[in-house]
Image (cartoon, rainbow, N blue to C red):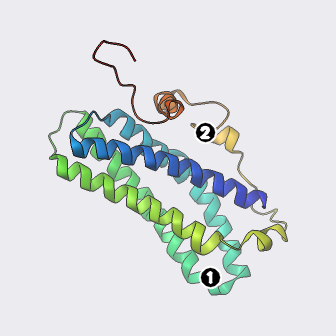
Amino acid sequence: MSAILNHIHQDHRNMRRLLDMLDTEVSDLTTGADHDYALMSDIVSYFNHYPVRFHHPYEDKLFNWISGERPMLASLVEELRLEHKTQGILCREVSMFLKAIRAGHIVPRDKVVAQLNDYIEVQRDHIDKEEGKLFKGMEELLADHHMIEIPIPNRAELDPLFGDEIDIAFSALADALERGGGPRRTRPDGSD
């Protein structure tokens, strides 16, 4: 597999993992089980950081190149590029929404669940569209070309959660990932 696609696929796997975690938290919220708004906020904050600042701009450069090589994909590429802009706006809106809830604003549970479910669906649909409609079958095309004009970002340096060093802002989220999911729950006897 080309290094370019490997990089994108790994980012998408990481994002799906976070979306699954967010989905679990929303399910817990729906059923009235313990849920963690701080963890939900951290997940959305990550999407507002790494994907919006690094992953999407990198893909946008790749999209330009693909459009030149495969003009028949230009409309799909433009659709995905517009989704990147929409996702950036949506990330900021959901982040502010969760911040207000954490600050004590009263919001009906069904509204919170609907907002977060929409957010998860938009993110998953976009990843699925990129993977299934655009990048599927691109390995040969990308492997055959030297794309010097599109250097691959160094995930180890740029990714504050899945990189070499975990940013302190994402340390609780990293701990939750390490535990395999949601927040640290305390048993009735006080133990973890």
Q: Residue at x 18, y 51 (%)?
A: 110
Task: Determine crowd level at label 1: few under 14, some 14-19, many 20+ residues with C-alpha closer than 10 A.
Answer: some
Point out residue 149 in the picture as x, y percentages from the top left corner: 78, 63
Task: Determine crowd level at label 2: few under 14, some 14-19, many 20+ residues with C-alpha closer than 10 A.
Answer: some
Question: Any mark on residue 162, and which?
Answer: 2
Q: Residue at x 64, y 59 (%)?
A: 58
Looking at the image, tell me whether mark 1 or mark 2 is earlier in sequence order: 1
Q: Is residue 11 left or right of residue 107?
A: right
Q: Identify the amino acid type marked 2.
A: Phe
> Image quadrant for the N terminus?
bottom right
Mark 1 and mark 2: Cα distance apart in space = 31 Å
- What secondary structure is marked by label 1? helix
Q: Is residue 140 left or right of residue 124?
A: right
The image quadrant of residue 39 is top left
Q: Identify the amino acid type marked 1.
A: Leu
Q: Residue at x 64, y 87 (%)?
A: 72
State the residue position of label 1. 73
Image vertical order of residue 116 relative to residue 136, above or below: above
Point out residue 104 in the picture as x, y percentages from the top left corner: 19, 33
Point out residue 115 in the picture as x, y percentages from the top left corner: 28, 54
